[in-house]
Image (tube, rainbow, N blue to C red):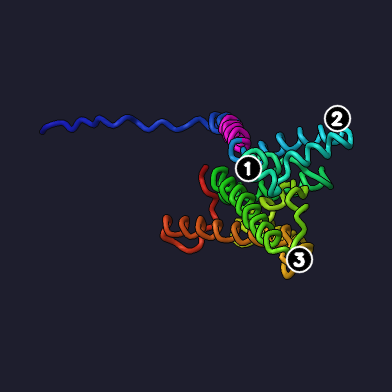
Amino acid sequence: MIPIVTTEHPYRAESPASAPAREPTRTAGRLRRTVGRRPRALLLPIAYVLAAGVVTAVQTWVLGPEDRAALVDWASTNLTNLRGRPIESLAASAFVLEPERWSRLAVTALALTTLTDRFGNRRAALIAATGHVVGTAIGQSLLAIRIALGHAPPDLRGMPDVGPSYLLIAALAAVALYGRRPMARVPAIVMSSVEGLSWLHGITDADVTAIGHLTAFTTGALIGGVLALRSRAARGTGPSAEPFDG
């Protein structure tokens, strides 16, 4: 009879004392990965808060009234600046907060945080930046037409127009419609409704700010919808509430 030789290693039971010893190490590793990942995951709102916070601090504690007025005039996305230096004014105006500087900074930071949590940094930046640019372009273009037709005074070409309100309303629209959680969507719905009531009456008068806000809201809703549909199609399931990468 041929002897049967087994090559399997004998089962070695894990020491009961070793399992609890490994658990704190695993927990600490997960915690380090989570903490290290969150700043990168929220790069957009963190970068905005840092940049706008520095500008706001300078406005508040360094510049005098005349210098603040000069900064607002330089950064305004009005017809005069858009014709001469559109890139600088579009970029700078989103970081110059007048008036209600600190409260507006806090609200914008929260909106960008929830937007980034839903769509990721790159797509959130796309929504916010497009809302800012398109809202400005449509609002100021209609103002130029009204001035050419004699329906608005020519001195509005140099009107002060700064702040993140267009990118804010675009972010709120996307979060309100496609947010991941009710605790993010409900405040976005409330805030966008409050913002809407403040400029809704100006739409019938073709007010540049009202038209710009309406355009930014529509832009945020459309781009957010396209991104949400692409996510759903990629997963082949129902409407997705998972965050985007990037």
The picture places residue 138, in percent across and down from the top left corner, at 63, 57
Q: Secondary structure at mark 1?
A: helix
Q: What residue sits right under mark 3 in the picture?
A: 202
- Helix, strand or loop under label 2: loop
In the image, is residue 17 part of the stretch drawn in magenta?
no
The residue that appears at 51% across and 58% down in the rendered structure is 228
Q: Which mark is residue 227?
A: none
- In this rendering, the count of numbered labels is 3
Earlier in the chain: of badge 1 and badge 3, it is: 1
User: Which residues, given as a range, are shown in magenta?
Assistant: 25-39
- Taken as a whole, is the magenta stretch helix, strand or loop? helix
- Structural crowding at the residue carrying mark 2, measured as other residues with C-alpha within 10 Å and reported as few (<14), some (14–19) or many (≥20): few
Between marks 1 and 3, how big is the CA–CA gap?
Answer: 25 Å
Say which residue label 2 marks.
62
Q: Which mark is in front, 2 or 1?
A: 1
The span from disc 3 to disc 2 (Cα, nearest Å) is 35 Å
* Of callouts 3 and 2, the N-terminal one: 2
Indicate the amino acid at tag 1: Pro
Q: In the image, what residue occupies the spot 62% across and 38% down?
A: 43
Choose between 68 and 38: the one closer to the eye. Answer: 68
Q: What residue is at 83 percent from the left and 39 percent from the top?
A: 69
Mark 2 belongs to which amino acid? Val
Tell me the tag on residue 86.
1
